[in-house]
Amino acid sequence: MDTGDSRMMQDVIVVGAGLGGLCVLHHLLEAGFAASCIEAGAGVGGTWYWNRYPGARCDTPSLEYSFGFSDELQQEWHWSEFFAAQPEIERYLNHVTDRFDLRRHITFDTKVVTARLDESDWKWTLTTDDGRRWIAPFVVMATGCLSAPALPDYSGMDTFVGLSLQTSSWPGEVDLARKRIGVIGTGSSAVQAIPELAKVAGHLHVFQRTATFTYPSHNGPMDPAVEEAAKARYPELRRLERTLSNGIAGFGGAPMFQPPRPVNILESTAEERAAVLGELGWGACRAWSDISTNAQANEMAVELYREMVRRTVTDRLAAEALSPYGYPLGCKRPVLDTGYFEAFNRPNVTIVDLRSDGIQAITESGIRTSSSDIDLDVIVFATGFDAMTGALDRVDIRGRGGRSLRDEWASEGVKSLLGLQLAGYPNLFTVNGPGSPSVVANMATTIEHHAEWITACLLHLREKGLSAIEPTTAAQDAWADRVNEIASKTMYTAPTCNSWYLGTNIPGKRRQFLPFVGGLSSYIAICDDIAREEYRGFHRT
Ligand code: NAP
């Protein structure tokens, strides 16, 4: 339906009011652009609006998973824990929204369904699910990397008479006390939810397809001394984040991963490995220099991890089921947990290993595996996302000559210049788009960098009297090659690796590694150089 109702003459429309959208909106307004934002949810927060499942929490330290663009903001906000939980992050983002007077620029409960370029005047027209049209020369898609939920396609999905829930669109408070709950999936979301669900469930069945690598977060209440020390030199620490490969300086106080020691596990003795295991525990598997380049070394390190699982999970069969096999350490995103393996020592928790006992169907009363029917009151789908591209290509985006981004990515693979812009789609920007560090770095840092870069780019166009900018195909191809080449030397792309980074969690999605893993600091240097050199690799009109 096209009601003809349109919001004319914004300079920029920002799609999404999560961390990315809020940050871009603020930067654009500060720079004097007329900008407005369209958000599908009823409130701000994006990921932190939708993912309300029990245990939802960030795995980047709170003091760093926050904005640095205003020192007043970072001084006045107090984080109660090293790793903040969803409600606190949502409160923070609401505070940011009101503190910087962003709310009146955001239209909520409204979903963008199409985006079309008119080449005659370089304007984009967006249509939303309420039939409205929105027109602006520039569009910033801040639609998130992990915001398009993925659901499995088991037969009988709609026959289950109990409650079906998704971690990625959790409806807030749900009374799960004494319920028979089944969780499908053991990625980050499930690993956080399982210990919390186990505390209240009558019985919890965990349906696991791939055992995960997860590490204790050592989360706890914020230490006032740590907070004070960080606040005393916050701007300096923010600068430090940008000089690091993952944007996390570790000043949150909670122990983070240590860099590997200069020792090869292939050259170690059994006694040395046992000593490292005794000293570092869960960190022992990551402590060696050769595990990211040598498959045999990697497998030896995985064995140290399995040993920790055996030491933690008391039931021998459960420990074996929870032990990762068949893919390397460093292939999937590492998970941080609070009491994950310990939850399986509770009498009300059962692991169902789908490697040997696959799901046949969802039934009226629960889940049918090859060996049994498991009766459930609640099924929780913690089955992940169509990551990095899903939220973008669920919008029907049409660029030059009516070309379709969705079709182009499906047939030719995903390409972008710097994860910031797409050849053929002038004046459309992506925040943390494919080809940028995004999900392999501190998302708050990468978002701020993108917000600054996009704003500076628009100011540059305005200053020069230009009306359009778009990557050249050659520059975009070269960047895609670089992204692939760097990833091809890592465990992220090992032949036995399947992950949402590679898109292999989505049936039919092309196997392609999506983020830039060359390091945040070098990425920022590249982006800055390009801007300094009058946007080398971009065509301006
Ligand atoms: P995920 O890592 O993709 O995990 C999905 C889980 O569901 C996997 O165990 C997957 O198994 C399983 N699964 C998918 N389809 C299935 C099927 N048909 N049958 C059985 N199992 C199936 O998704 P996620 O846990 O939502 O996490 C995604 C990302 O979001 C994380 O890696 C992280 O970047 C982010 N996240 C972060 C936090 C945090 O900050 N702490 C919390 C939650 C999420 P396979 O492994 O076999 O595919």
Image (cartoon, rainbow, N blue to C red):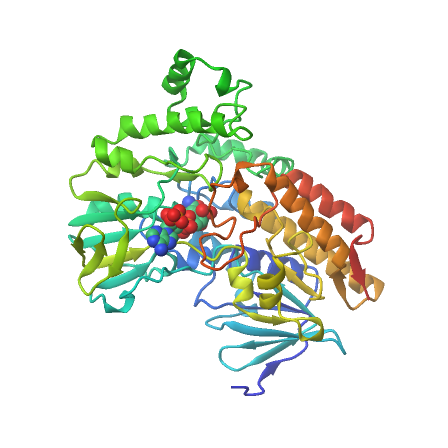
Q: Observer-nearest residue: 339 or 68?
A: 339
Whether 282 is drawn above or below 488: the answer is above
Whether 179 is drawn above or below 124: the answer is above
For the point 53% across and 31% down, the residue is 292
Farthest right residue?
Answer: 464
Q: Observer-nearest residue: 529 or 366?
A: 366
Residue 404 lies left or right of residue 467; in this view the side is: left
Determine which quarter of the picture holds residue 305: top left
Q: Where residue 323 sits in the image (x, y, percent)?
A: 33, 35
For the C terminus, the image quarter is: bottom right
Q: Where residue 262 sits in the image (x, y, percent)?
A: 56, 19
Q: How many labels, in total?
A: 0
Q: Is residue 278 visible?
A: yes
Q: Observer-nearest residue: 163 or 501?
A: 501
Residue 363 lies left or right of residue 235; in this view the side is: left
Farthest bottom residue?
Answer: 3
Q: Observer-nearest residue: 125 or 87?
A: 125
For the point 53% across and 28% down, the residue is 294
For the point 54% across and 43% down, the residue is 440
Residue 211 lies left or right of residue 376; in this view the side is: right
Q: Is residue 174 visible?
A: no
Q: Where residue 244 sits in the image (x, y, percent)?
A: 61, 35
For the point 54% across and 25% down, the residue is 290
Whether 401 is drawn above or below 503: the answer is below
Q: Where residue 540 sits in the image (x, y, percent)?
A: 81, 63
